Image (spheres, grey):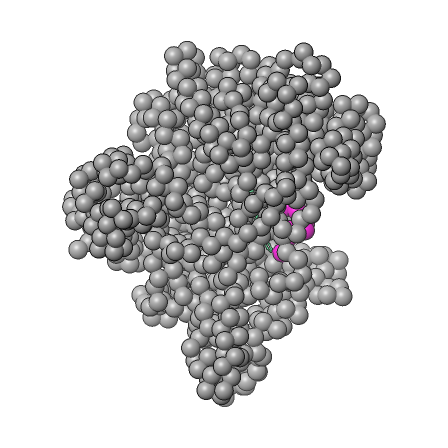
Amino acid sequence: MASKHSKKTANTTAKAPVADAVNTAAECSCTNDLFHPTVEQFKDSITTHLRRSIGTSEKKASPLAWWQAVVYAVNELVFERLTQTQFTHASNDTRAVNYLSAEFLMGRLTVNNMCNLEVYDTCKKALAELGIDINELCDEEPDMALGNGGLGRLAACYIDSLATLKYPSIGYGLHYENGLFRQEIRGGRQVERPDSWREYGCPWEVCRPESTQEIPVGGYVEVQTAPDGTEQKVWHPAHMIKGVPWDIPVVGFRGASVTVLRLWESRATEQFNWDVFNAGGYVDAQEEKAQCETISKVLYPNDSTEAGKMLRLTQQYFFCACSLKDILRRYNRAHHHDYSSFASKIAIQLNDTHPTIAVPELMRLLIDEEGLSWDAAWKIVTEVFAYTNHTLLPEALEKWPVYLFERLLPRHLEIIYEINAHFLDGEVERMWPGDNEKRAKLSIIEEGPCRMVRMANLCVIASRRVNGVAEIHSKLVREQLFPEFAAIWPDRFCNVTNGVTPRRWLLACNPGLAELYNEVSGKDWPLHLESCAKMRPYADNADFRKRFMDVKHANKVALAAEIKKLCGVDVDPNALFDVQVKRLHEYKRQHLNLLYILSLYNELLADPAKTIVPQVFIFGAKAAPAYTLAKDIIYAINKIGERINNDHRIRNQLKVVFIPNYRVSLAEKIIPAADISEQISTAGYEASGTSNMKFSMNGALTLGTMDGANIEIVAEAGVENNFIFGLSVEEVQELKARGYNPWDYYNADPVLKSALDWLDTDYFTPGQAGALSSIKRSLLDHGDPFLVLADFASYRDAHKRVEEMYKDKERWARAAIINSASMGKFSSDRSIEDYVHNIWSLKSFDVAEHK
Ligand code: 26Q
């Protein structure tokens, strides 16, 4: 497809100092020089690729081959734009953000790229004329599941927004051969299976061997004295590992610009293999090769047992080291090892502590390899890095044993010690002179039988900004997680409330609702989600309410068909769809939901004539493989569902389904069909949540606690249009301080008691009494750490309010519309603008044509 572009001139203000260079993307004119192929051109491109790139024909092609041909056709447009973007950035020597993340949960790219390039309808027609159904074709694409959950998906949304808003940027991560495990349910239990997302190749990615990096590991550090008497540290690594980059171009809305996701794959270096091989060690050479290649083999599920930890640290170091070398290589192409403008050209964002090792690695590169002084290097480091915290759970704060550093990264450990000494003897001593307790608490090194490196402390000390991901979370980060650090550096701490991309989470996944938005807000709403507020007044329009709820109903019909296919359960699209989809964790309290379901089932059995609003409870969740209780909860959901779904006494008024293998592509089908979005974490534990935003955008009402971004969501959409329940953050803390006793609630509430006691029987697991007892034990014998029982009564009451409102169809529709119309704030474009203004100081660039 030959493209035709109108001429645009490049922005010429690139040399302005950073502080003055801030603007908003909204101020820039939108490029509209994107080439839009006709249906005929698309057909031609697809069939040509089938024949010439894949070596098949329309007659013989498998569904996979058709999908690949479509990707090649779309990629022609993407690559054109990629080249233009890179030319624009290089010729303007732009300041860029480098987003370092161990996870990017991209999901599928085909529909998203087609929607962003506004060629979806053309492609759909072209395929229809070729006898292919676009939905079936797009279902051929495996999800790129290179992440666990929220943090990884957030990174993916941010890449989309950076491309859309035309900010110079790149995402750096790991090219895992296996993403998050595929979940199968056997006999009600989770079974993990490998996920090989690129078994037959991934047509979106491009290997860039010319940018391969070599990364040293292991060995020892030698102290050398230079002729001038100064000490120099020389690291003699034991091995070198090769990092091969794979680029995935991500195109912004209307092709605004293209941001590259660069993922590193580990390989053995030829040199090492060759030497060992020549020495007769063929087997050793193969073993070494296998070890090196193991580094990028699997994504760690977000638990970590002691075994295999070395590999996780190696992964983190490997991708950070590759990325920094890449950043330095690009910088030096323009600046020839003059580091005076490094900090004005480069921002590095650490997505949680997983890439923290980049801090000592940049120090090492600047001092040992580029010859800078400690002070000069530290000044650069502290101007370049910023850190996003995503959790307050103490057990989730990363710590690495010192002995692992000694073995893997001896030079980095020395640098960490030196950073620590400067900090403790400098800032801490000045603030709290002679206070050893403070020193111990704030030190990067935790003393004890096994000395540990506290990655979060290192991050805070090295970063110019530390942000939480929702107002309440950022407040807790500042006041409870890092109060002393905040006392030393009050201006370092800030908030950036998360957001999600409305392109994927509305335009692409809910075309019916997107069409209503087009009518009401105009076609630019995917760029300015605030404009959706224009839909608010339509909540009072009966005709509009009907159309809105018709869209919802059609989405529910589609989901019901999917549920039938995946779970074999019949569900009625007229029933209320109550959805909880997210990772399984006790703090997210899927078991609170389950206890309510038990109580409702019990009510129905107790009164066979009772009529309720028909309800379908829909779950989707993966549990970390070593998290036994989480896996028991999945088992309980499945077994309880099995019993309820086959109990004719309750006349189909209640159904419970667990959809296996929850992932991005399933979320895109589930979320548009939800009536209720369950966001029921114990207040103070969910940093933000992001599915809450997606649900609300798609017209679901939130049933949730005052936690994370729920607080901001109801502030926008109105508490009267949602269902808030449970203890607040302060009340949770007070109750815990007072001494919480779950037995008090158990003994006082007969409804709760019978739900819990049911778990000890064999009612749901015939012949196997006690198979579900671990849940009850955790809530009573083990102290109910997440206050499930304390919130039960209030949760049950909220459910009754849900039922009441659902009976009033008009009231419900009004609330659904207001929710959807109030989510402007939660576009990831707003989040990115916050990062740009408060942290990164970037300037956006219109992408110019370049021949
Ligand atoms: C750590 C060590 C070893 C192995 C794995 C990990 C690991 C991996 C992933 C630890 C944590 C994660 C993921 C955390 C996560 O997804 N957090 C979520 O981030 C979202 C985006 O900010 C928030 O909305 C959620 O509230 C938060 O739970």
Residue 550 lies in quadrant: top left
Asked if residue 50 lies in the magenta stretch, the reply is: no
Judge whether 655 appears above or below 164 on screen.
above
State the extent of the magenta-drawn residues as a range.
392-398
Q: On screen, 728 above or below 157?
A: above
Q: Position of residue 626 (x, y in %)?
A: 66, 52
Lateral position of residue 437 relative to residue 619, left or right: right
Q: Is residue 343 left or right of residue 654?
A: left
Q: Position of residue 452 (x, y in %)?
A: 68, 63
Q: Is residue 311 visible?
A: yes
For image coordinates 44% across by 28% down, the residue present is: 558
> Could you say which is closer to the camera, residue 88 or residue 494?
88
Question: Is residue 396 rendered magenta in the image?
Answer: yes
Residue 63 on image: x %, y %: 34, 45
Between 374 and 560, the one lying in front of the other is 560
Q: How many marks?
A: 0
- Which residue shows up at 43% across the image and 67% down it? 243
The x and y percentages for residue 413 are: 60, 70
Answer above or below: position of 464 versus 41: below
- In the image: residue 662, left or right of residue 455: left
Residue 435 visible here: no
Residue shown at 37%/33% (left/top)?
A: 507
Quadrant of the image containing the C terminus: bottom left
Instruction: Say above or below: 97 vs 629.
Output: below
Residue nearer the viewer, 12 or 750: 750
Which residue sits at x=20%, y=38%?
Answer: 39
